[in-house]
Image (tube, rainbow, N blue to C red):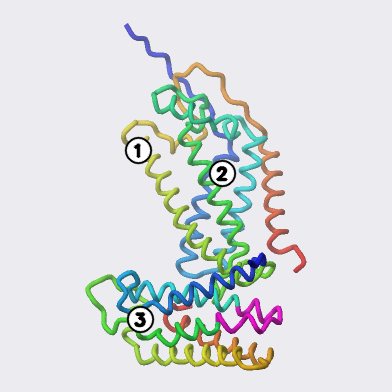
Amino acid sequence: MTQDPRAMLRTLSVFTLVAASSLPATSLAASPKAERIAGYKASKLADATIKDALQAGNVSAVSEPAEAMAAFAARLTSLYPREVGDAFVSPSMEAILKNFPDFAQKADAFAASSRDLADRAAAGSPDLVQMRAALENLQASCLACHRSYLGR
Amino acid sequence: MMTTRPQRTIRVWDIPTRVFHWCLPVAVIALFVSADTYAMELHALAGEAVLALVLFRLVWGTIGSQTARFRDFVVGPRGIADYLAGHPPKSLGHNPVGAMMVLALLGALLVLAVSGLFADDGIFYSGPLAGRIGNALAVRIGELHATGAYVLAALAGIHVLATLWHLLLRKRNLITPMLTGRIRTERDVPPPAFVGLPLACGIFTVAAGVVALLVHGLPS
């Protein structure tokens, strides 16, 4: 059993992300909203874990969190409703629903960049420089969406 | 026939404790508003102010004026039970239940202020010391920091409600003495001992210096 706290955090984040992204949409325990929240939180942690791994030059530690993030990103648009119900809707959600094609485009960019990073990490001899560039690309896709829909 | 002792006015709160007390809600409101509007520079500044204030209060609670000292107002479970049973508190300052709230608020503020230094929201903002720990740990601390804010909000809400309860139902005004420093009491007790203002200024200057050094002064 590993004693390295960073390795433990990495394992925990991967477990959380895999659990969040592999839950069936019909599950009673996990509503799309709960999946979304858990997925975003886990993605944030996965991103930080990947950053740690790349800073340490440990490319082998990137694959699992990147794969889990790509799996969540691929499901992202399916976790959003298509119209506002009677329930309270946050300003961010309202903006997303009003501009769903734009949001979907940004979600696609997130999915493509996280998939690119996961594929590079899974390649036989991953290139550290290219993976750092891929991570920057992924983070840019996160920023674009946050700027548009969270106003920051 | 019952006799009523004459009431007298005595000073119970020194200036440093009162200034600390009223600076804190201003800083905490600034923290919540800045977090909500994502004005992170203001948030960081208010967080540093809170950390300096809490450090000051911890020292002032040890060597400050009598009613500010923890040993004057913090009592054990028996003291709390006695107070709840109707016995007058030992201290002229905080009552035993209020003392628990003082400790809870100071503890929550300390945890939040320190965690804020190491927090990373994973997108836009990193605390000034987040770079000293791993990114994943900083994100975890950021989540703890955000969750802890709800605990602080709950504690602050309880504190305000308790003060209003004293004011409206028990007809005991705890707010005015925290402004004027004086209470009217019929208890025959000696007035509390006070420590000079220059010492408080010195302690706060050192506390602010420690925070400034922590946040801006350590080599990365």
Give percent across and percent down for residue B121: 54, 71
- Quarter of the figure with residue A83: bottom left
Residue at image position (36%, 40%) is B164
Q: Is residue A36 above or below residue A74?
A: above
Please report contact status of discs 1 and 2: CB closer than 8 Å, yes or no. Answer: no
Question: Rounded to the nearest whole Å, what is the CA distance between mark 1 and mark 2?
Answer: 23 Å
Q: In what element is the residue under mark 3? A: helix
On the same chain: label 1 and label 2? yes
Residue at image position (49%, 92%) is A112
**A60 magenta-colored:** yes
B113 horizontally vs B35: left or right: right
Give percent across and percent down for residue B103: 53, 42
State the residue lying farthest toward the right.
Answer: B219
Q: In what element is the residue under mark 1? A: helix
Magenta stretch bounds: A50-65
**Residue at numbered disc 3:** A79
On the same chain: label 3 and label 1? no
State the residue lying farthest toward the top.
Answer: B1
**Residue at numbered disc 2:** B19
Residue in front for this viewpoint, A3 or A117:
A3
Q: Closer to us: mark 3 or mark 2?
A: 3
Mark 1 vs 2, N-terminal side: 2
